[in-house]
Amino acid sequence: MDRSEILKWLSEEDEGRLETLWYRTDDVRRANVGDEVHLRGLIEFSNYCVRRCHYCGLRADNHGIVRYRMTADEILDCARKAVEFKYGTVVLQSGEDTGVETEWMASVIRRIKSETPLAVTLSLGERGDEDLEAWRRAGADRYLLRFETSNPVLYERIHPSLPGRRSDRVAILRTLRRLGYEVGSGVMIGLPGQTCEDLADDIELFRELDLDMIGVGPYILHPDTPLGRKAVVSCRLSVARPVRSALDVERSKLNVERSKLGVEGSSTLPTACCLLPAARSQVPDTELMTYKVIALARIVCPLANIPSTTALATVNLARGRELGLQRGANVVMPNLTPPGYRALYEIYPSKACIRETAEECHLCLESRIAAIGRTIGAGRGDSTASRDRVQSAPMSEANS
Ligand code: SAH
């Protein structure tokens, strides 16, 4: 699929034609990764963060949340639950927490690897090469680091670099590949200022990086962030003239209400593109746009493991996860974080399943997967792309 076709699909609104995209994607998914849905148990083990990302509720200067860091024993308890529930993988995720020391993390990874058969995925933000190397040596199998947007100007605006250290996530993804990790990345859909051209670039970058895992979800406004505050101010100022940020706020409120009611639907308010000629190419932060990107990601990276994300379930609690799975995804990430910590890991508000226990998430997801005629994946659900890469690489490279 070339760039012009990607762009055509991103701006397609006709439901009938979109049905053909969903069919095609579902065929590609079945032919390449089969009907199995792999379960990755998510452990959100720390919400400390040194960064000041303009979209994320964990940002360092959000003083409105209580910070926590789980102990190694608490993390191991969650990993044992993953084994009990027959998940093949645990995903250890945190804010970018400099209090997570290299050796402590390495010892947690070693314990999980020696006491369980689980694959270990890390999602700890931007860490130095030595850390990534030490954790790979300790046995970590995979690393997730979304590049968030491939547009460098937009990226710098929403994800400021730390003093003296330019944020270059694509460079880190290449390092991760060199170190032998399975590599995952992804983007948010509907960031203020993001265009369809940006999304087409993102999808082409997925292909270029030959990703093993691709996670995409709608951007969800958090009121205690610079992007959230800007949207609220614009909303108050724009009584007479609808602007995109005013719509953002309304759409966001509606999404949350709809989600509480369990009402389904793929679009809430008309997108700003329809109302404002100047903002015509702004990407809407809708479910529908997210499904399009998942579908196109599946077509350009047919072997990738693609989750139907929590953010999708947040904007459509009733059907978001299922529709993601039916439009290209083959992975879900049930939450294993103990309930006492879960609500504190608030990257965006009204996150799906924050009041559930690990057991409840487990049963709920199992029945949702069965209801759409899919099966639960056995084993670790490793990336087949990664296996092929290792087999075709010269010995020295494969072993480096
Ligand atoms: N510290 C890690 C993990 C961050 S949370 C890291 O930086 O990689 C994982 C992902 O949640 C982020 O990569 C981002 O894409 C997503 N996220 C953060 N804030 C969000 C928001 N307001 N709406 C939707 N997704 C968000």
Image: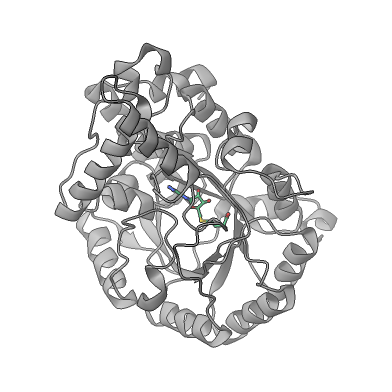
| Residue 280 shown left or right of residue 116 in the figure | left
Which color mode does the image show?
one colour
Residue 339 in view of the camera: yes
> Which residue is located at x 25 percent, y 49 percent?
256
The residue furthest top is 277
Tell me which corner region of the image, top left, top right, bottom left or bottom right, holds residue 395.
Answer: bottom right
| Residue 266 shown left or right of residue 75 in the figure | left
Tell me which corner region of the image, top left, top right, bottom left or bottom right, holds residue 373.
Answer: bottom left
In this view of the protein, which residue sits in the foreground, 138 or 169?
A: 169
Residue 124 is situated, as x and y percent measured from the top left of the image, at 61, 62
Vertical placement of residue 263 versus 278, above or below: below
Residue 86 in view of the camera: no
The residue furthest right is 396
In this view of the protein, which residue sits in the foreground, 141 or 265?
A: 265
Residue 28 is situated, as x and y percent measured from the top left of the image, at 41, 39
> Which residue is located at x 31 percent, y 71 percent?
362
Q: Quadrant of the C terminus?
A: bottom right
| Residue 260 shown left or right of residue 63 in the figure | left
Residue 134 is situated, as x and y percent measured from the top left of the image, at 76, 70
Vertical placement of residue 153 versus 280, above or below: below
